[in-house]
Amino acid sequence: MHLPTPESIRQKRNELGLTQSELAKRAGVSQPLIARIEAGDVDPRLSTLRRIFDAFDKSEIERHVMARNLMNTNVISISAEEPVDAAVRIMEENDISQIPVVENGVPIGSISEETVVRSMAEKKALEVSKMKIRDLMGDTFPVVSPGTHIKLVSHLLETTPAVIVLERGQIAGVVTKHDLMKLLRG
């Protein structure tokens, strides 16, 4: 049986592009403990080594996760010419909070519960429900290719509810925060 050396732990961490702090967080230990293990100042418990190597395994898997691995290919979209109440009905029926607005297979905007609610504060509900989506839609969600690394998708999802995956100019899928959280079940 080959036991890891302090040097091999440091090499593996560097190979995976993790800082000591990132590894510590993923393994549920302190950064100073990781530093002491790598320096050879402390002999870690077997349970600590197991947590470190579990964190390495998960990081290894994440290195290879691309948008295509997480995207939902059943993309629900709507036309800009539809009335707002049609978008609300679709969101309710599908338990989603936003929809890409698409024209000829290309995303041109988005409509969300938040946008609808905000407009209702300014206008009567009936007036809003009969408006065209075109008059209310927000910006399109960010667009990535299927081979985009999940770290970039994750970064984009910090500021937007969804990311569209385009392949050959057409929508291939969508990644939401919910899809990203599936990685935690890993």
Image (cartoon, rainbow, N blue to C red):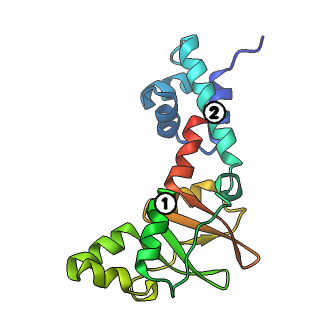
Give the residue number, with chain letter if any, for mark 2. Answer: 56
Residue type of the residue flagged with mark 2: Phe
Q: CA distance from mark 1 to mark 2?
A: 41 Å
Residue 171, given in percent of the width and then of the height, sits at 68, 72
Q: Residues within 10 Å of mark 1 (few under 14, many from 20)?
A: few
Q: Could you say which is closer to the camera, residue 42 or residue 74?
A: 74
The residue positioned 42% from the left and 28% from the top of the image is: 30
- Judged left or right of residue 33, residue 53 is right
Point out the image quarter for the N terminus.
Answer: top right
- Judged left or right of residue 18, residue 170 is right
The residue positioned 77% from the left and 76% from the top of the image is: 168
Q: Does residue 43 show up?
A: no
- Judged left or right of residue 54, residue 89 is left
Give the residue number, with chain letter if any, for mark 1. Answer: 93
Residue 146, given in percent of the width and then of the height, sits at 71, 63
The residue positioned 23% from the left and 81% from the top of the image is: 124
Q: Could you say which is closer to the camera, residue 109 or residue 180?
A: 109
Residue 97, given in percent of the width and then of the height, sits at 43, 62
Q: Secondary structure beneath disc 1?
A: helix
